[in-house]
């Protein structure tokens, strides 16, 4: 098994979402002792935004790209190769202002490429990243699970599904800004959810 862990917190140290993602990876590796692990920390190694220059590079035929354009596309190519090679994907996703971090959006923009990770067919779009198990470690300061305030889960279900990744388990640690006892309880409940996911 090849495991890809994406840490999308803006914090390179002390991130609650990375802590929760690490717990999922520990459990995954316990189930699959020979598994390989690739960790991409988007705080330590941020990916550039999809801007006009990046779009220009992507829409220029490979043989016509300038060296700068080829270098920019190559950055996305690395992320696409990582996600293609993964059997299991673990996303550490904090909630920032009711949405996903910009770091995670940049990663999604990089891996979502027509004819590589999805394609359009006569029957509509088809995701090409099939057969992967995805675990999403969600951490929030407040409690939003199952409410209209939770924009993360619907968005991630849609965008990951668009790319072909439909087998998704969400693990929540909520109320982390509501005091030490609430934080401790949140991680205890999350750990129970992780154990249940592997039962």
Image (spheres, rainbow, N blue to C red):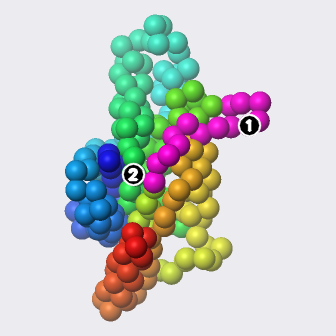
Placement of 142 over or under 99, stated as above or below: below
Magenta stretch: residue 129 in it? yes
**Residue bounds of the magenta highlight:** 120-133
Q: Is residue 199 left or right of residue 44?
A: right
Residue 171 x, y percent position in the rendering: 44, 70
Identify the mark at residue 124; answer none if there is no mark. 1
Residue 65 x, y percent position in the rendering: 45, 12
Say if residue 151 shows up in the picture. Answer: yes
The residue under the point 40% across, 57% down is: 91
Q: Which residue is mark 2?
A: 88
Residue closer to the observer: 12 or 91: 91
Identify the mark at residue 79; answer none if there is no mark. none
Quadrant, the C terminus = bottom left
| Real-space Cα separation, disc 1 to disc 2, in angstroms | 26 Å
Q: Quadrant of residue 106?
A: top left
Q: Are marks 1 and 2 in contact (CB under 8 Å)?
A: no
Placement of 172 over or under 30, stated as above or below: below
Which residue appears farthest toward the right when viewing the image?
Answer: 122
The residue under the point 47% across, 13% down is: 62
The residue under the point 68% across, 31% down is: 120
Which residue appears farthest toward the bottom when viewing the image?
Answer: 181
Placement of 107 over or under 137, stated as above or below: above
Residue 39 x, y percent position in the rendering: 27, 49
Q: Is residue 34 left or right of residue 89?
A: left
Kindly state the secondary structure of the residue where label 2 is placed.
strand
Q: Quadrant of residue 182?
A: bottom left
Q: Nearer the viewer's eye, disc 1 or disc 2?
A: 2
Nearest to N terminus: mark 1 or mark 2: 2
């Amino acid at each position: 098994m090849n495991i890809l862990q994406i840490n999308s917190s803006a914090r390179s140290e002390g991130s609650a979402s990375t802590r929760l993602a690490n717990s999922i990876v520990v459990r995954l590796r316990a189930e699959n002792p020979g598994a390989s692990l690739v960790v991409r920390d988007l705080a330590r190694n941020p990916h550039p935004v999809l801007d006009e220059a990046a779009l220009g590079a992507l829409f220029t035929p490979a043989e016509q790209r300038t060296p700068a354009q080829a270098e920019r596309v190559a950055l996305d190519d690395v992320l696409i190769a990582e996600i293609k090679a993964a059997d299991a994907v673990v996303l550490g996703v904090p909630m920032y202002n009711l949405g996903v971090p910009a770091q995670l959006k940049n990663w999604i923009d990089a891996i979502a490429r027509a004819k590589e990770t999805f394609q359009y067919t006569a029957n509509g779009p088809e995701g090409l990243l099939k057969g992967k198990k995805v675990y999403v470690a969600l951490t929030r300061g407040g409690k939003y699970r199952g409410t209209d305030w939770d924009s993360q889960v619907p968005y991630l279900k849609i965008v990951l599904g668009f790319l072909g990744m439909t087998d998704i388990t969400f693990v929540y640690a909520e109320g982390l800004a509501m005091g030490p006892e609430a934080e401790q309880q949140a991680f205890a409940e999350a750990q129970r959810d992780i154990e249940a996911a592997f039962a």
